[in-house]
Image (cartoon, rainbow, N blue to C red):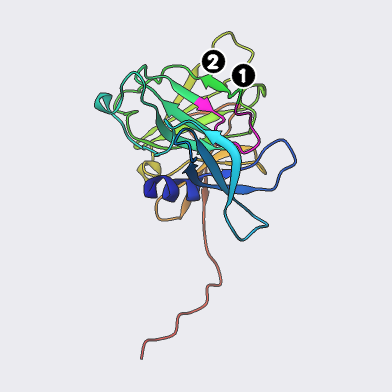
Amino acid sequence: MSLFLSRLRLEGFSTSLRQTPPCSIMGAFPREDGGLRRLAVAYAHKPSVTQLDKVIPLGLGLVFNCYDDDDLDDEKTLTIGASHGWVATLKKDGILRLQDDFNPVASDANPKRIPLPPLVTLPHCQTNIITNVSMSSSSPEDDEDCVVAVKFLGPQLSFCKPAAGQSRPEWTNIKIENPCFFSSRVMYSEKDNMFRIPGSGGHLIGSWDPCNPSDDPKLHKVEFQNLPKLPMAT
């Protein structure tokens, strides 16, 4: 539970198309009958944690950033990322799925499951260690412009449109050349409609157009001016 809380407390910020207050996913608490667990959230306008009536399956919980075949069996589900109330999960079949179990306003009786194409590993890259998952909107099932971005440890960055008009969605795989982005996380900027990755050290930001991602991102240098001088130690 501690790993689950620590990861989702940082990553589990959730919003919905419905008019509900922003909230952070704090965890899941077992019900008295020992079955499904109740979702717990922290609303921005409330100081305490709220346990909802919404329940989530027992198979979801711990967030794994890496996996191998020994971690998976026919029933086990690994949670490898979260964005907009959706969680990205992986089973033994190697298919990445989006599930809305952590969306506070999603249906318990009819949860949504969106399978994505099998992951493709580029040469000299790996797809077993996942840094994080980010989405451009909260409606991957019906928004044709919604893009899912998966950042792997190392140079690979992958994009997919789950609801695109094509018969079968496909991954667009990018190999990042600058090593300062290899261990960083991907995030989406609604203001600029760009996926961005901050470089290690904080001096550089790479931007990718979700409609036309390429191996050559836009680079922005981060410069600080007029910084106050630190007092001399005495």
Depth check: give the residue in front, 216 or 94: 94
Q: Is residue 219 above or below residue 49?
A: above
Q: Does 184 sit left or right of 211 as displayed?
A: left
Residue sitting farthest toward the front: 33
Residue type at mark 2 is Pro
Residue sitting farthest toward the top: 167
Crowd class of label 1 (few under 14; some 14 to 19; many from 20; radius 10 Å):
some
Residue sitting farthest toward the left: 70
Residue 171: mark in rendering = none
Q: Which residue is mark 1?
A: 163
Residue 102 falls inside the magenta stretch: yes
Q: Position of residue 159 (x, y in %)?
A: 50, 27
Q: Which residue is mark 2?
A: 169
Q: Position of residue 170 (x, y in %)?
A: 50, 16
Task: Residue at 65%, 28% (x, y): give it.
Answer: 139
Whether residue 37 is visible: yes
Q: Position of residue 113 (x, y in %)?
A: 54, 21
Residue sitting farthest toward the bottom: 234
Task: Residue at 38%, 47% (x, y): give it.
Answer: 3
